Image (cartoon, rainbow, N blue to C red):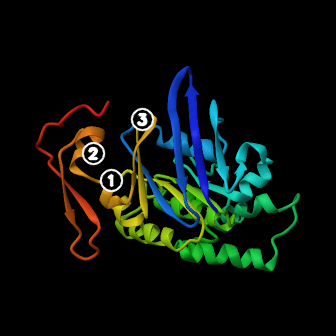
Amino acid sequence: MELALEHVDLDLDGRKILRDLSLQVGSGEVVGLVGPNGSGKSTALRSIYRALRPKTGVVRVGRTDVASLSLRRSAQLVAAVTQEAGIELDFTVEEVVALGRAPYLKGTEPLTAREVELCTAAMRRLDVERLARRSIMTLSGGERQRVLIARALVQEPEVLVLDEPTNHLDIRHQLELLSLLRGLGPTVLVVLHDLNLAAAACDRLAVLSGGALVASGTPESVLTEELMASVFGVRASVVRHPLTGDPQLLYSVTAQPVKDAH
């Protein structure tokens, strides 16, 4: 199902964070949202899962304005893994993952056999099945992150948004997660800090700067030396990955920034 942000403006505390943001993500597509700190990436995601309401503009899933939906229906269509997501209750891993079925349940009705299998399969895909009976409070940051992603998959969403999902993950689990994104099925919009990982994992990249979309396209067309200088304020050389052919950036750590990205 397609995701679209149409001319979205969003203010916080009297400051404009998003400026006339229009972005489309095709059905089943994986799009990486990248940009400097403070460019509005997380705010854009929050407008999709309705944590924030745009001042103007519309967020659509398919042809439907998400603001017109009940919260239950929104949660059935859109799942989110946020930077702030945390579990402060002493639930087991399998209990946390099962919370992903909450939008479909009434009251305290138990999971069906199909839903139990769905939870087991999600834990297996995220390599946390062995932790099923462990308290979420005893896990490392990376383990918790994988549990929360498994919970999102259990929602069976049409659209999945993830804010820096590779935070706290070791390199093996970073690569496994980003490989998994391509085969999930839902439409995916993911904020990534590591541009080389974004180039390898995403069909397209959308670049934000100052709350506005400044570039959108394939990683090859977007990740240019000129864009790195003008948006990120760094010197970088673009090379080809020797195995995949994906564009990769080599940064000059000793060079002075070309210009201030702001």
The reply to whether the C-beta atoms of the residues labelled 2 and 1 are less than 8 Å apart is yes
Residue hosting label 1: 222
**Mark 3: which amino acid?**
Gly
Q: Position of residue 47 (x, y in %)?
A: 61, 41
Q: Position of residue 226 (x, y in %)?
A: 22, 45
Q: Residue at x 66, y 65 (%)?
A: 97
Q: How many marks?
A: 3
Could you tell whether 225 is left or right of 199 in the image? left
The crowd level at tag 3 (other Cα within 10 Å; few <14, some 14-19, many 20+) is: some
Q: Position of residue 251 (x, y in %)?
A: 18, 51
Residue hosting label 2: 227
Q: Decide which of 191, 29 is in the foreground and name it.
A: 29
The answer for how far apart the CA atoms under marks 2 and 3 are is: 17 Å
The answer for how far apart the CA atoms under marks 1 and 3 are is: 20 Å
Image vertical order of residue 13 relative to residue 5, above or below: above
Q: Decide which of 61, 33 is in the foreground and name it.
A: 61
